[in-house]
Amino acid sequence: MGEISTPEAPVHPVAGLSVPPPPRTLIGIAAWVGFGLFAAANLYGLLAEQTGLCRIAQPLAATFLLLAFVASIRTWSTTTVLATIGVALAWVGDTLPPHLPLDSRLGSALAFGLAMIAYAAALRPLWLQVRDSLRMLMAVPYAGVVIGLYIACFDGAGDLAVPVLLYAVALATMAFLAAGVNSLTWVGGALFLLSSSVLGMSWFLSGAWVPHHEVWIMASYFLGHAFLLAGILRAAPRAPEASALPASGGATLVIVD
């Protein structure tokens, strides 16, 4: 005979979703702060045209984002595993393309395309449970934006036309699914779409010019990642034994024969 105490109180549901607490460890808190600091440093480097600072800050921001997300996960599930894979692939896209023996734009498109697929797979079961009709309706124009931009950028894409098309489809799918989960994922998906749209225009649309476009690209990218992952953490399913805890939050006695 033995006993197991579980002192943690349950998380109260909000709109049918479990709301996670702040990161449970000092490591998680420090990692989120580190992500914010290095993201801000990268934006400052872009504004001040300090290329060296950007080359250091962007990979470090990606590293701290990955650490922060993993440290914030309360219960591992298919959703959180797939989301972690997505963050890891985004880290690859932020870190490795300049060091690979291929066009850095192709490397980025492949890495981030796979990241969007992983995020879409993580969001799908959450989307099936919630499917907010209003947000889904507002996300329908995403397809029009992606199709219009791809047509406009097709000639400029050249040999990258096919990889860019695959990335665009993965991005639109992720953004649409994100819109139907909760408000945080909706904002995150929309910001990802904005970031990639401005990036595609700067890469492939001849004559297009957006003032400080690199700053807008990275600012919407960093914020999109933060909102998307926060929304996934909020919506991710919890362990059955955790949801079965009494509302008072007292210890539970389990008798083992």
Image (cartoon, helix red, strand yellow):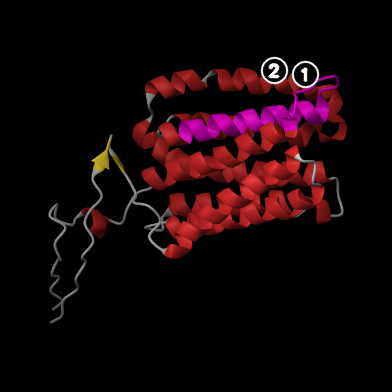
Please name the amino acid that badge 2 sits on. Answer: Gly
Crowding near pointer 2: few (<14 within 10 Å), some, many (20+)?
Answer: few
Left or right: 15 in relation to 161 = left
Looking at the rendered image, the quarter that the N terminus falls into is bottom left
Above or below: residue 130 compared with residue 8: above
Element at badge 1?
A: helix
Left or right: 234 in relation to 204 = left
- Residue placed at 56% from the left, 48% from the top? 36
Residue 210 visible in this rendered orientation of the protein: yes
Residue 89 visible in this rendered orientation of the protein: no
On whether residue 194 falls in the magenta region, the answer is: yes
Left or right: 163 in relation to 178 = right
Which secondary structure type mostly characterizes the magenta part of the structure? helix
Q: Which residue is mark 1?
A: 152
Residue 73 is situated, as x and y percent measured from the top left of the image, at 42, 56
Q: Which residue is mark 2?
A: 148
- Residue placed at 14% from the left, 52% from the top? 247
Highlighted magenta segment, given as a residue range: 185-213
On whether residue 97 falls in the magenta region, the answer is: no
- Residue placed at 45% from the left, 23% from the top? 136
Label 2, label 1: how far apart the Cα atoms are: 6 Å
Above or below: residue 95 compared with residue 48: below
Please name the amino acid that badge 1 sits on. Answer: Ala
Crowding near pointer 1: few (<14 within 10 Å), some, many (20+)?
Answer: some
Q: Which mark is residue 129?
A: none
Element at badge 2?
A: helix
The residue lying toward the viewer, choosing from 111 and 46, is: 46
